[in-house]
Image: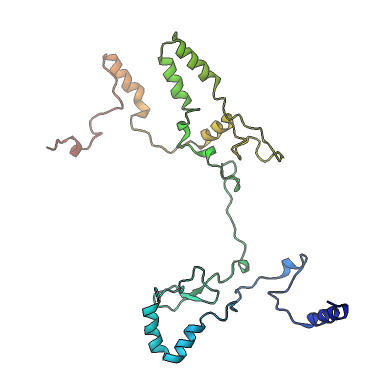
Amino acid sequence: MATPVKKAALEIAKKVIIPPASRAVTAAEAHKIAPRATGNTETTMPFNGWFSSFLKDRIGDKYYEKLRRVVLYKPDDPHSLEQQPTPNREIAITEDGKIKAKFRYPSPGSQAIVRQPDEDPGTTSEDPYDVSYYSRDTKRRYQDPAFPNEELEKIKLELMPQNDPVVKEAMEKFNKGATSSPGNKGKFATGATDYDPKGLRAAMSANHEALEESLDKNMPDHLPLPVWWDKQEATAAWYLERDLPVPLGCTGFGTIPREGRIARW
């Protein structure tokens, strides 16, 4: 483009009134411009629906409606089978059809800033960007064959013959603990990280010690206890004094409803 022609085009462009919604803005004035409450209602496909309009003009509304119900799939669909409704399409949200709503109206940008409530300090969900599940997955805590239930494994080994070489080897392995997943101490290919000193934000930096500590904090404490829990020692002593086997739990009169004690044949 020649220089005189280019200057003339620029002068003409300066005189053209550009709509506020589409004009270019600078970073300094961007925060002063309020977003529009409504989207652009001007269609980008003015040719859309020309055939329907042509038929309606030729055969009339009555016959066009009959033909439309024969040809179209779901002719009463409020969205006209559109996956995303157009901004100017109104959808009735009440049975009488008096109250209607538009897609993304008012626009989200014109609304007040959403207030996201903060979690309690010290909880695992305090950091909104912490989406790791294994640090609080207490349901599958003891299903890892490399790191099973420590207390249960210790009881099993203590009940076995201590002189057995196999038991000794298993005891040494148990005391040594899990050697897998030592964690990379927060050192990645992009450099060291300081946002998580315990390394539980990423699977590559997680280690068993920090994981067990996190699972201990997330263990459920709302499980109910049986009624005999506080008197289990006295109940066991009663059976031991009479040289009787100690049963599981503590049964007694009145703990089972009357209907439960009646045999049904």
Residue displayed at 55% across by 35% down: 214
As rendered, which of 24 and 236 lies closer to the eye?
24
Q: Residue furthest top?
A: 163
Please tell me whether residue 98 is drawn above or below residue 157 in the rendered image.
below
Q: Quadrant of the N terminus?
A: bottom right
Q: Residue furthest left?
A: 265
Residue displayed at 48% across by 71% down: 82
- Residue 65 x/y as whole percent: 39, 84
Task: Specify whether 170 is left or right of 231.
Answer: right
- Residue 31 x/y as whole percent: 72, 66
Q: How is the structure coloured here?
A: rainbow
Please tell me whether residue 120 is drawn above or below residue 208 in the rendered image.
below
Task: Specify whether 186 is left or right of 96.
Answer: right
As rendered, which of 214 and 132 lies closer to the eye?
132
Please tell me whether residue 73 is drawn above or below residue 233 in the rendered image.
below
Residue displayed at 45% across by 71% down: 81
Q: Quadrant of the C terminus?
A: top left
Rendering quarter of residue 262: top left
Task: Specify whether 213 is left or right of 155.
Answer: right
Q: Residue furthest right?
A: 4
- Residue 23 x/y as whole percent: 72, 74
As rendered, which of 214 and 161 lies closer to the eye?
161
Task: Specify whether 92 is left or right of 242.
Answer: right
Residue displayed at 20% across by 37% down: 260
- Residue 166 x/y as whole percent: 45, 13
Number of numbered discs visible in the structure rendering: 0
Please tell me whether residue 62 is drawn above or below residue 207 in the rendered image.
below
